[in-house]
Image: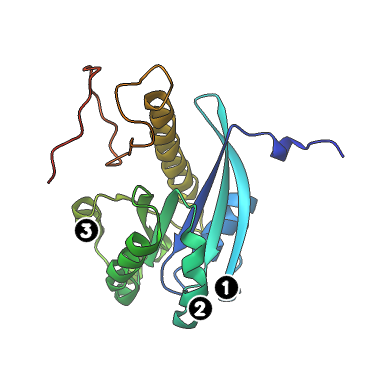
């Protein structure tokens, strides 16, 4: 059996969608991967995933996007699915303040179960419901900055910023991974092997070849 176009990629990144039930995670997934929206979509049971490839800097990035169930009773099974994830979209509903209040709890769960260097984007979904807005954009943006998250508002219903959200997080992950590959190449033998870690999401610009670990803060 020959390889299909979907099998050809340079990088495969696992990204998880997390957040309360009903915030629109499944529709964000279907809008990005199939350009579909279902008003009657049911709550996800357990986990489902879909894939889509995009181009970044001439490289093919295949995103494997996992949609985790938001209901409390499924939390135990979803924690295992954080394993191997390099990115996460933490989603809330801009018209339901409680879903935004619970972001802090989801963020803690993510920090507890996921890789410490995971790239996280805070997503205020259902921006089409601006007349029902309960979460001010500035408040969410300030929370994101305080917690070192990127931030965007989307609407799976009318497609606003859905492409941008996924493209931005996948590009950010790609930049970190490609920079790490350069630092970990055999030419750079200044640091002990296996001891190189990406400390923060922001790219580090440093012309000094003899990089030293940052101070303990």
Please, which residue is most extreme toward the front here? 192
Q: Secondary structure at mark 1?
A: loop
What residue do we see at 63% from left, 34% from top? Answer: 9
Comparing 102 with 141, the one in front is 102
The residue tagged 1 is 46
Circle 3 sits on which residue? 143
Q: Which of 90 and 186 lies nearest the eye of the viewer?
A: 186
**Residue with the mark numbered 2:** 74
Within 10 Å of disc 2 (Cα), the crowding (few <14, some 14-19, many 20+) is some
Residue 93 percent coordinates (x, y): 38, 68
Residue 47 screen position, x and y as percent: 58, 67
Q: Secondary structure at mark 2?
A: helix
Residue at 49% across, 25% down? 57
The mark total stands at: 3
Instruction: Identify the element where label 3 is drawn.
Output: helix
State the CA–CA distance, disc 1 to disc 3. Answer: 28 Å
Estimate the spatial distance between the alpha carbons at disc 3 and disc 2, rounded to whole Å.
27 Å
């Amino acid at each position: 059996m020959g390889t299909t176009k979907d099998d050809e990629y340079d990088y495969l990144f696992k990204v998880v969608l997390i957040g309360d039930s009903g915030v629109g995670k499944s529709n964000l997934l279907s809008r990005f991967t199939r350009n579909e929206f279902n008003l009657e979509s049911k709550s996800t049971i357990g986990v489902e995933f879909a894939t889509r490839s995009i181009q970044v800097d001439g490289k093919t990035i295949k995103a494997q996007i996992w949609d985790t169930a938001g209901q409390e009773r499924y939390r135990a099974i979803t924690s295992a699915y954080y394993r191997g994830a390099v990115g996460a979209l933490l989603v809330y509903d801009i018209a339901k303040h409680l879903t935004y209040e619970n972001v802090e709890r989801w963020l803690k769960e993510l920090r507890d179960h996921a890789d410490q260097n995971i790239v996280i984007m805070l997503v205020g979904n259902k921006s089409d419901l601006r007349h029902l807005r309960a979460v001010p954009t500035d408040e969410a943006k300030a929370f994101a900055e305080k917690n070192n998250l990127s931030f965007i508002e989307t609407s799976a219903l009318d497609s606003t910023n859905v492409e941008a959200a996924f493209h931005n997080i996948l590009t950010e992950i790609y930049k970190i991974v490609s920079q790490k590959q350069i630092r970990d190449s055999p030419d750079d033998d200044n640091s002990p092997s296996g001891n190189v870690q990406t400390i923060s999401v922001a790219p580090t610009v440093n012309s000094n070849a003899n990089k030293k670990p940052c101070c303990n803060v």
